Image (tube, rainbow, N blue to C red):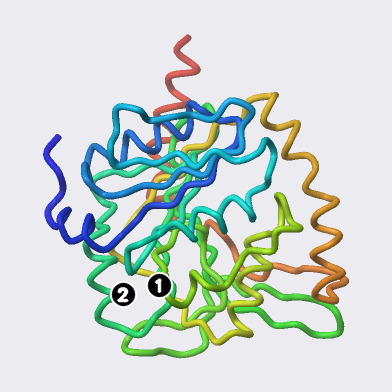
């Protein structure tokens, strides 16, 4: 597969940052998909697995080996500290790049505007079943009232330079190293609420956040029993997050998958169901 058009501007200006833990198959798939379209774009993999994954044959990928179970927040912070390009792309290890990634468009957009964070759109796939259930809608605004934090999906705070202003977006975004990169993730939170905490503080810090309509990431999760055991600890970190921000309850207003969104990708689901019934 030839590199995507504009891959040179991506390589010169962008570093991909991936945090991984106990998912060598996922992070390998992620980096392989990056290399298919962006062969010379730098990548930093922050890995606090008990046996970190190395990419010895890939001169553009650096594995930052961390003490086991360091946590997602500290891992991301340490990786971002190593970024030497003007921008970085923050993604998860179960994300995949395809031809619609359009990272050059992201670089051009953030270069031409004053935004600090610009998210990609995410196509979400069912674990194991491997069909797309639609685009995950998440970008929105925060409002806190009487201890209740409301997350309004698809709501914005007006427009800046022709693009909607949001308080929070998904965790697949390009960011300015000089601004967003200096706002650290709370290292007390190993897993569970690091994302919401970061964007609540980003809002207070005045970071400008939007989304690109032309760039997509594909979320293809696989959860092993071993990995799931570590994820179950998120409740204790959630309690800390709630106390920190004085939140009694969180309420999401709006639908992550609207009807027309799901209808667009229903043929994939139907194909899967037909295949199962034919067994």
Q: Which residue is found at the position 40% from the left and 72% from the top?
A: 176
Q: Nearer the viewer, residue 155 or 268?
A: 155
From the viewer's perspective, tell me whether residue 248 is left or right of residue 26. right
Measured as percent of width and height from the top left, residue 151 is found at 66, 72
* Residue 47 visible here: yes
* Residue 259 visible here: no
Of labels 2 and 1, earlier in sequence is 2
Measured as percent of width and height from the top left, residue 174 is found at 39, 64
Q: Which residue is found at the position 46% from the left and 52% from the top?
A: 91
Q: Which residue is found at the position 76% from the left and 75% from the top?
A: 149
Relative to 218, does residue 213 appear above or below in the rendering? below
**Local secondary structure at mark 1:** strand
Q: Nearer the viewer, residue 261 or 148?
A: 148
**Local secondary structure at mark 2:** helix
Q: Characterize the local packing of mark 2: few (<14), some (14-19) or many (20 or more) Cα atoms within 10 angstroms.
A: some
Looking at the rendered image, the quarter that the N terminus falls into is top left
Measured as percent of width and height from the top left, residue 27 is found at 46, 35
Q: Characterize the local packing of mark 1: few (<14), some (14-19) or many (20 or more) Cα atoms within 10 angstroms.
A: many
Q: Quadrant of residue 247?
A: bottom right
Q: Quadrant of residue 243?
A: bottom right
Residue 176 is marked as 1
- The CA span between labels 2 and 1 is 8 Å
Q: Which residue is found at the position 59% from the left and 63% from the top?
A: 255
Q: Quadrant of residue 256?
A: bottom right
Residue 147 is marked as none
Residue under pointer 2: 110
From the viewer's perspective, tell me whether residue 110 is left or right of residue 230. left
- Decide: marks 2, 1 in contact (CB < 8 A)? yes
């Amino acid at each position: 597969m030839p590199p995507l058009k504009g891959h040179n501007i991506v390589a010169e200006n962008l570093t991909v940052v991936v945090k991984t833990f106990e998912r060598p198959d996922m992070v390998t798939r992620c980096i392989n998909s990056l290399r298919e379209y962006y062969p010379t774009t730098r990548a930093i993999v922050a890995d606090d697995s008990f046996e970190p994954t190395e990419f010895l044959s890939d001169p553009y990928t650096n594995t930052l080996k961390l003490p086991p179970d360091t946590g997602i927040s500290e891992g991301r912070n340490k990786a971002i500290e190593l970024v030497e390009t003007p921008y970085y792309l923050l993604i998860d290890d179960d994300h995949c790049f395809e031809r619609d990634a359009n990272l050059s468009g992201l670089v051009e957009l953030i270069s031409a505007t004053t935004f600090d964070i610009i998210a990609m759109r995410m196509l979400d796939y069912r674990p194991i079943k491997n069909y797309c259930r639609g685009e995950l809608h998440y970008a929105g605004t925060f409002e806190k009232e009487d201890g209740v934090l409301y997350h309004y999906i698809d709501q914005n705070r007006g427009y800046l330079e022709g693009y909607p202003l949001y308080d929070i977006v998904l965790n697949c975004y390009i960011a300015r190293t000089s601004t967003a990169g200096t706002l650290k993730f709370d290292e007390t939170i190993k897993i569970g609420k690091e994302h919401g905490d970061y964007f609540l503080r980003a809002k207070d810090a005045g970071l400008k956040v939007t989304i690109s309509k032309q760039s997509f990431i594909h979320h293809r999760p696989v959860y092993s029993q071993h990995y799931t055991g570590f994820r179950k600890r998120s409740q204790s970190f959630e309690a800390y997050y709630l106390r920190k921000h004085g939140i009694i309850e969180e309420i999401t207003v709006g639908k992550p998958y609207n009807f027309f969104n799901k209808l667009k990708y229903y043929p994939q689901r139907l194909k899967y169901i037909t295949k199962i019934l034919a067994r």
